[in-house]
Image (spheres, helix red, strand yellow):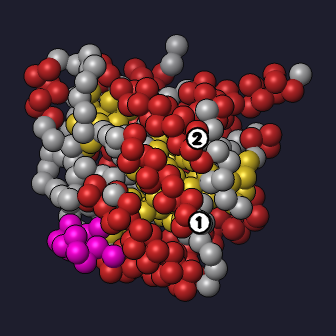
């Protein structure tokens, strides 16, 4: 019998979702803060056989935590101790902003899904940067060259007009790139007005070129650059984004962000409607996310890395994404339902599959 789902139902299922997240994340950080992370790692550390490489970076496991859980770089070390091969921080914006009005995070438990319209709530690039520097130094000291990887996801400040988006992304790239193992340009959240318009190839080109230029200058090295796209793009747009990524020499594409769709849900329609606008994540996104991955893989082959996210819950899901062409796989929503030992469970399943394949 799995204990955490019972605990979730008793302790969190009735609670406001954002408050539950804050309490859960606080507990994870507290365990690290009192020095118990090393004890945890005896049970959660990924097997050596899971080490993998993508865009020139070594990862302890191909499975990592997607952006959105640690929006402000407050728990990177603690999350790494749970077994994630990488932790993607963000989305971080050039200016601090409170995000959208509350409530803005909702569970659809029957669907193992979440609806959010958080709106990139974060402390801003200048405040987050020192946290990343501290976390990176701590990981390097503890793990050396085999440390968990830090990804940094950047987006547009809400009050900045679309015509000034490039300059706004430059601010974040300048402040954060020195501490990022890879950098992600997020143009696919449905919760910042107009943001998804930047996914068109014509709008995306100058943005990606500017972030590349700024990140290289700031970090003094070529920081791997990826773009995160929505699952709601038409196939023609997927093709255009993939071709642009190849043309500009990006290191990868993260597919996919949350969806604005609500098709095929098991939850009561009234409950779904009560959640209101926002991006849907979790199990209902699995099929479309996998479809987008396969379409991208058919276009780019092995010429750039594909990071698959959306509806990932089990080691079998991760293995399916890797077999479909992903270099790395991320999860988030299932973490809320499965609890703190989820990553360790996924890693154990992956290691068993790898060992069995070798036998």
Q: Residues within 10 Å of mark 1 (few under 14, many from 20)?
A: some
Residue at image location 40% in from the left, 27% down from the top: 283
Q: Quadrant of the C terminus?
A: top right
Q: From the top left corner, tell me how far across and down residue 1 is, in percent.
A: 52, 13
Q: What residue span does the magenta drawing correspond to?
A: 155-166
Q: Name which quarter of the figure residue 314 lies in.
A: top right
Disc 1 is placed on an element classified as: loop
Q: Residue at coordinates 51% horizontally, 55% vertically from top-left? A: 243
**Left or right of 261: which side holds 169?**
right
Name the foreground residue: 117 vs 243. Answer: 243
Is residue 93 found inside the magenta-colored segment of the image?
no
- 162 falls in the magenta region: yes
Please give the residue where the numbered disc 1 appears in the rendered image: 249
Left or right of residue 359, residue 139 in this image: left
Is residue 151 something that shows in the picture?
no
Residue at 60% x, 28% y: name it.
320
Outermost residue on the top side: it is: 1
Up-down: is 94 above or below 114? below
Question: What's the CA distance linking mark 1 and mark 2?
Answer: 16 Å
User: Where in the figure is residue 265, as x and y percent of width and height?
Assistant: 26, 20
In the rendered view, would you say 202 is above or below 286? below
Mark 2 secondary-structure assignment: helix
Which of these two is toward me, 242 or 310? 242
Q: Is residue 291 visible?
A: yes
Residue pointed to by mark 2: 297
Quarter location, residue 234: top left
Q: Nearer the viewer, residue 319 or 23?
A: 319
First in sequence: mark 1 vs mark 2: 1
């Amino acid at each position: 019998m799995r204990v955490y789902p019972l605990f979730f139902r008793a302790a969190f299922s009735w609670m406001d979702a954002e408050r539950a997240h804050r309490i859960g994340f606080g507990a994870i950080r507290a365990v690290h803060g009192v020095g118990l992370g090393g004890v945890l790692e005896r049970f959660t550390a990924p097997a050596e056989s899971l080490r993998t490489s993508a865009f020139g970076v070594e990862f302890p496991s191909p499975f990592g935590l997607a952006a959105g859980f640690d929006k402000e770089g407050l728990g990177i070390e603690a999350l790494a101790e749970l077994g994630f091969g990488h932790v993607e921080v963000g989305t971080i914006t050039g200016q601090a902003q409170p995000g959208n009005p509350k409530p803005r995070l909702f569970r659809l438990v029957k669907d193992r899904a979440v609806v959010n319209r958080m709106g990139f709530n974060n402390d801003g690039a200048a405040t987050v940067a020192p946290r990343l520097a501290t976390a990176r130094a701590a990981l390097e000291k503890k793990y050396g060259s085999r440390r968990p990887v830090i990804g940094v996801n950047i987006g547009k400040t809400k009050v900045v007009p679309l015509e000034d988006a490039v300059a706004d992304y430059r601010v974040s790239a300048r402040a954060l790139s020195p501490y990022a193992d890879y950098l992600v340009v997020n143009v696919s959240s449905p919760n910042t007005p107009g943001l998804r318009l930047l996914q068109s190839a014509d709008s995306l080109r100058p943005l990606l070129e500017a972030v590349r230029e700024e990140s290289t200058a700031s970090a003094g090295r070529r920081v791997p650059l990826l773009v995160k796209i929505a699952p709601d793009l038409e196939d023609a747009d997927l093709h255009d984004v993939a071709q642009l990524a190849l043309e500009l020499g990006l290191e990868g594409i993260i597919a996919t962000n949350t969806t604005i769709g609500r098709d095929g849900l098991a939850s009561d329609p009234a409950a779904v409607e009560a959640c209101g606008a926002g991006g849907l994540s979790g199990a209902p996104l699995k099929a479309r996310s996998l479809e987008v991955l396969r379409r991208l893989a058919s276009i780019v082959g092995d010429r750039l890395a594909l990071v698959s996210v959306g509806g990932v819950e089990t080691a079998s899901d991760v293995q399916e994404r890797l077999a479909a062409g992903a270099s790395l796989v991320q999860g988030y929503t299932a973490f809320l339902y499965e609890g703190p030992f989820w990553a360790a469970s996924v890693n154990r399943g992956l290691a068993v599959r790898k060992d069995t394949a070798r036998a």
